[in-house]
Amino acid sequence: MNNWKTPKLKKLVQAFLSLRSQPEMMSFLRDLCTAEELEELSTRWEVAKMLEKGMPYRQIAMSTKTSTTTVARIAFWLEHGEGGYRVALKKEKKQLSTGGI
């Protein structure tokens, strides 16, 4: 998928970046996504955080009620993706250490 950075995606990214608060982002996400999609995205984020902590795949799968295949896929993107997970994990860790979340 070489051409994934489409003009439509860039416009969506701009919409995300325009939001300044958690309530704004929550409202936008709920309007944009189904409840199931939000649950899936939230689970993927939880899996990424557990992988970062070094938890075993099976333990993550059981804890998040997802498959080990999904955990492995997220682990692949965590290690070989565009670096987005790493940036977000680093920023979240910094916010937690400063009391920002």
Image (tube, grey):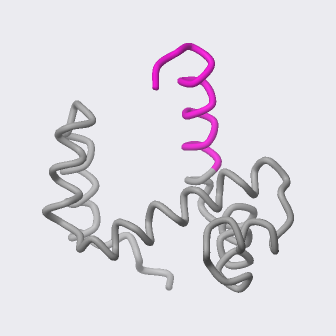
Residue 81 horizontal side relative to residue 52, left or right: left
| Apparent side of residue 42 relative to residue 28 in the rendered image (left or right) | right
User: Eyeballing the image, is 4 above or below 88?
Assistant: below
Specify whether residue 87 is painted magenta: yes
Q: Considering the whole magenta stretch, tell me its main secondary structure.
A: helix
Residue at left offset 61%, top offset 42%? 89
Tell me what residue is drawn at x 86 percent, y 65 percent.
56
How far across and down, in percent of the image, does residue 44 sit? Answer: 55, 65
The percent coordinates of residue 28 (x first, y second) are: 17, 53
Q: Which residues are magenta?
A: 86-101
Foreground of the two, 32 or 7: 32
Residue 92, above or below 32: above
Q: Residue at x 56, y 13 (%)?
A: 98
Counting from the top left corner in percent of width and height, residue 6 is at 30, 73
Q: Is residue 42 magenta?
A: no
Q: Is residue 34 left or right of residue 86?
A: left
Instruction: Estimate the x, y position of residue 40 in percent, counting from the top left.
Output: 44, 72
Residue drawn 46% across the image and 19% down it? 100
